[in-house]
Image (spheres, helix red, strand yellow):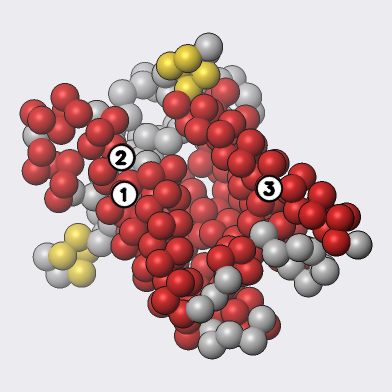
Amino acid sequence: MIPDVLHIGPIPIHVFGIFLALAFLAAGAVAGREFERRGWDPALASSALVWAAVGGLVVARLWIVLDAWPDFVRDPWTFLFTGGGFVFYGGLLGGALAVTAFFHRHGIPWFRGADAVAPAIAVGQAVGRLGCQAAGDGDWGKETTVPWGMAYPHAVVGWDKPPGVRVHPTPLYEAAAYGAIFALLWRLRREPLPDGTIFSLYLVLASAARFLVEFVRINPPVVLGLTEAQLMSLALMAVGGWSLVARRTWRAAAA
């Protein structure tokens, strides 16, 4: 990880912010190539990402406010106007709503558009998780003795564990998983698949990756020994799985 001490003159440059910008640049490049391949204006890909970013950030912030309401009431300024406190599933929901409006505005069929941006989402997540790893934003896992365990002495959220203690570097686990998902979706995008298949696969695979990584993360269980993120993952896996089965059924019926 990297100490968060970068500055341009008096202006602080946060490590995670750098990786977030890189994530959007990578996602924009991927989405632009896919938009162009599908015969759409590649410039629309950048606009779609701006819509997704704004919608995702707003809903992610609202999500964390509702999820930690007592803390928000005690210090609302910190929750609303600082860089901390974003939840991926809130961001995914907000981004999806914003991009839905964008697709409607530009006449892009929803499932075709979702297929076009799914690989971009995966690569953006991979780079973003590298940012979590570099900054040490608290997304690490449980204490471990595995050889690749790590300490985060320069974490932006603080590191209170004694010397010699190591934890699972779960941001790296997720970055590797999302990178593999991107590679698979990027390869499959040229196959003659029903509209919505690529996005449905993304939902299943990305949610399964998060579900599994949660077993070694430090988030507390809420129901049946599962964390909030695992419950959301199961819901999204169910949605994606149902969509895959339905599209296969419709395709067979049409044939």
Q: Residue at x 14, y 50 (%)?
A: 81
Q: Position of residue 178 (x, y in %)?
A: 61, 50
Q: Nearer the viewer, residue 202 or 239?
A: 239
- Kindly check if marks 2 and 1 are in contact, taking CB atoms under 8 A apart as contact: yes
Mark 3 or mark 1, whichever is nearer to me: 3
Q: What's under tag 1, amino acid-wise?
A: Val
List the residue tagged with mark 3. Answer: 243
Q: Earlier in the sequence, mark 3 or mark 1?
A: 1
List the residue tagged with mark 2. Answer: 63
Q: What's under tag 3, amino acid-wise?
A: Ser
The Cα–Cα distance between marks 3 and 1, rounded to whole angstroms, is 24 Å
Give the class, few, some or many, for how many residues have Cα within 10 Å of label 2's Cα (few <14, many ≥20): many
Q: Residue at x 82, y 49 (%)?
A: 249
Answer with left or right where residue 77 lies relative to residue 7.
Answer: left
| Residue 183 seen in the figure | no
Answer with left or right where residue 27 lies relative to residue 192.
Answer: left
Q: What's under tag 2, amino acid-wise?
A: Trp
List the residue tagged with mark 1. Answer: 59
Q: Position of residue 147 (x, y in %)?
A: 63, 28
The residue furthest front is 253
Label 2 residue SS? helix
Label 3 residue SS? helix
Q: Residue at x 37, y 35 (%)?
A: 138
Q: Residue at x 57, y 23 (%)?
A: 215
Label 1 residue SS? helix
| Residue 126 seen in the figure | yes
Q: Nearer the viewer, residue 160 or 31?
A: 31
